[in-house]
Amino acid sequence: MNLKTNTGIAAILLMAWILISAHGCTKNRPSAPSADGYTEHVYTPLYASGFRILGAKGLESTILEVTDPWQGADSVVRRLFISRNGEQAPHDGIMSAITFPARRVVCMSSSHVALLDASGAIDRIVGVSGLDYISNPRIQAGRDTIGDVGFDGNLNYELLLSLRPDIVLIYGVNGASPMENKLDELGIPYMYIGEYLEQSPLGRAEWMIALGEIAGTRKEAEKAFAVIPEEYNRIRDTEWTDTPTVMLNTPYGDSWFMPSTDSYTAALIKDAGGRYVYSGNNSGQSLPVDMETAAILTAQSQIWLTGSQATTIEGLHSSTPKIRFSGMAYNNTADLWESGVACPHIILKDLAAIFHPDSTAGINDTAATLRYYYLLH
């Protein structure tokens, strides 16, 4: 038999060995199930309604499933596949896939920064939207190394791509994020974080566990979250001797927007032993009232949480010239809407101290010790 024949036989034997080996590997490796096959409940939230973490029998990978991730969404589901040990993503039902854990994260909302911080993964952030408007001290300390990708409508995708993100955390307002198509085009994984839609203050904070799953710090996030309901519920369950009426917000243009009675802010007021003064909106979203109605509601209130630009009572009256308020007016710090999302127990403590300054329930902080609010003088 000549050399050419021997070479041909060797090639045939080698190919047969490769096919047998490949068949053996395929046989031993579980095939990727459909996304609907992920039915094991890895984490089911106690308070949040917008996410859950799912697994599949015999596999270590998980799916972060987010439902109705923007206002007005109806039965909309977005799923992120988080691959472990090289396991393959399902062939259907997946919006994006990442390899566990995400080490380079871009946040399109300051609340995402706070939730990652609370989950022990602040060091994973390589980019943000609006760096100058973020309060987190570690982000500000590292601003020379953290990219500011800009805002919707004026995003710097070239910078975003240069950051080499493992994932971009996005959000929708009244529909899908306009970033979706471009991120798909660039091949950058992304996921909706819809914590702001939660009406429960504890539900918003619980999203730190979803972000912990993405960043590989879920156990730390679960531990951090566990203490929050304990303190929150302790304050909420206090029996108050009075229930002050509370007004919210200041004019925006010619309208005064008032939250729904089942809103996040209304829940905090109720749980802190106050009574939200406006009962005319149960729509689930903020709606405008005219200035005359706002003036009547303000006159009926003992506490006014203004949410305004004013830093003094004189400045408040200048912005609302038809209203002279005789009660106690407070403004909030900008950080209320950032770190506050992960600290509802501290917000509640502030409000309880404002509503019940003479309380003996262990929360009678003076104005100097409030974390998220300050009295307008």
Image (cartoon, rainbow, N blue to C red):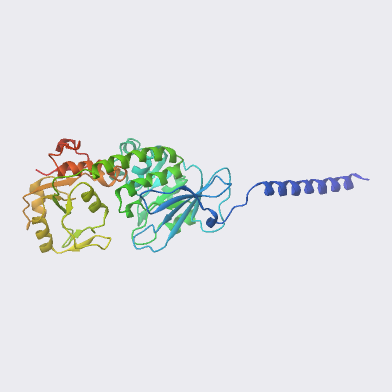
The residue lying toward the viewer, choosing from 4 and 42, is 42
Quarter residue 118 falls in: top left
Residue 194 in sight here? yes
Q: Position of residue 148 (x, y in %)?
A: 36, 46
Q: Position of residue 78 (x, y in %)?
A: 45, 57
Residue at 44% across, 41% down: 218
**Horizontal placement of 312 versus 100: left or right?**
left
The residue lying toward the viewer, choosing from 346 and 10, is 346
Q: Position of residue 127 (x, y in %)?
A: 39, 44
Quarter occupied by the N terminus = top right
Residue 104 in sight here? no
**Hey, which residue is sitting farthest right in the picture?**
1
**Horizontal placement of 59 versus 304: left or right?**
right
**Horizontal placement of 286 versus 226: left or right?**
left
Quarter occupied by the C terminus = top left
**Horizontal placement of 23 versus 335: left or right?**
right
Q: Position of residue 51 (x, y in %)?
A: 41, 52
Residue at 12% across, 58% down: 297
Residue at 58% across, 45% down: 86
